[in-house]
Amino acid sequence: MSDSDITFYFLSSILSLLIFIFFLIKTKQAKPNLNLPPGRMGWPFIGETIGYLKPYSATTIGKFMEQHIARLRTHLLKEVEKHTRLVLSSWKEKTTFAAQDEAKKFTFNLMAEHIMSLQPGKIETENLKKEYVTFMKGVVSAPLNFPGTAYWRALKSRCTILKFIEGKMEERMKRMQEGNENSEENDLLNWVLKHSNLSTEQILDLILSLLFAGHETSSVSIALAIYFLPGCPQAILQLREEHKEIARAKKQAGETELTWEDYKKMEFTHCVVNETLRLGNVVRFLHRKALKDVRYKGYDIPCGWKVLPVIAAVHLDPLLFDQPHHFNPWRWQNNDGASGNSNIFLPFGGGPRLCAGSELAKLEMAVFIHHLILNYNWELTDNNDQAFAYPFVDFPKGLQIRVQAHSLI
């Protein structure tokens, strides 16, 4: 074979490869309207396969997975911190206010923005939040449906909430049909409308439930931490040392935002979070139903009977927890059997029905505590304002506190 033949075949191969690559690129660009998850497509044809197959220590998840997982964690952490700072920056010294309301504002704003792109402080956001408060108070009240009762008000609020959500859905679908979408509305509602086969009624029920579940229990947990900590000054001191160390390291590195590594360094904070959840018992019992006849410890539970496992009874059992009514975050350091046993620590339920938002709730609590400890001292102004179970946990007077600003950085 002559040199000219070799050159011809080589150039032909290169041209064929270029045409193939061009075809692949055009194929990927053929669907510009897809709202794909964040990330890179990698090289044509092979994608990111080389990085994925690169050997790594079997005791780790590998650099490839760490980087890809960190992308979702970083985004979520930034949003939680943004809404935390927004709420805390509005606090005024030498004034008394309801800490429970502030915690609800934080968690509701976070969920409302991610679910429907509702902005904090806007009239529509504030009105929707008020309707949810009314809805919550009537959900577990006596089902007396006549004017003036909590149940009647809850039903009215539910209708108002559903009409609001349906209005947002109609606006989105109209813009989609006109090809006039808002790029900033990259939220759950948009995703569901584009990528799911759910009916209108199912979408309404989904958004209603997620807004409710996504903010109510988290806000009460934060309020409980604010309530418990002043009664344990040593815990506040240890929290300050932990968060001062994190803040100093970030200042030296020229960083301003928390990272996932910072979150993992909050070891004592995680103990405070666990103890708050154990002693506070935001979710006090679970609703279950026997799907078949069950015999348990000599007793028969017929098929169809409702079973309510009482989580609070487990968390406050002196046989399982030493001095169970005492707020003691250090019990989670000493590993008295609780931290390693999922059968006796069930703040988010368990089994296949484990709360899907458990990690988000703990992240919200830790980030809120981080900025609270670094920026404020606080005192309870009414020692009689304790948490009560209705059966939902609530502070009747809103947990009134007074704050004094400081800086530990």
Image (cartoon, rainbow, N blue to C red):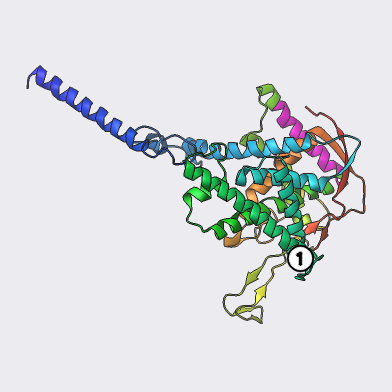
Q: Residue at x 75, y 70 (%)?
A: 143
Q: Which residue is denoted by mark 1 in the rendering? A: 151
Q: Residue at x 72, y 66 (%)?
A: 310
Amino acid carrying label 1: it is Tyr
Say left or right for 235 vs 172. right
Return the x and y of residue 275 as percentages of the image width and height: 76, 51
Main SS category, magenta section: helix
Q: Is residue 267 above or below residue 155?
A: above
Where disc 1 sits, the SS reads helix
Return the x and y of residue 324 as percentages of the image width and height: 80, 58
Q: Is residue 107 magenta?
A: no
Q: Is residue 176 above or below residue 199?
A: above
Q: Is residue 245 magenta?
A: yes
Q: Residue at x 67, y 43 (%)?
A: 110
Q: Which residues are magenta?
A: 232-249
Return the x and y of residue 299 as percentages of the image width and height: 67, 81
* Residue 346 seen by the camera: no
Return the x and y of residue 287 as percentages of the image width and height: 66, 67
Q: In which quadrant will I find the C terminus?
A: top right
339 or 303: nearer the viewer: 303
Q: Which residue lies most toward the top here?
A: 3
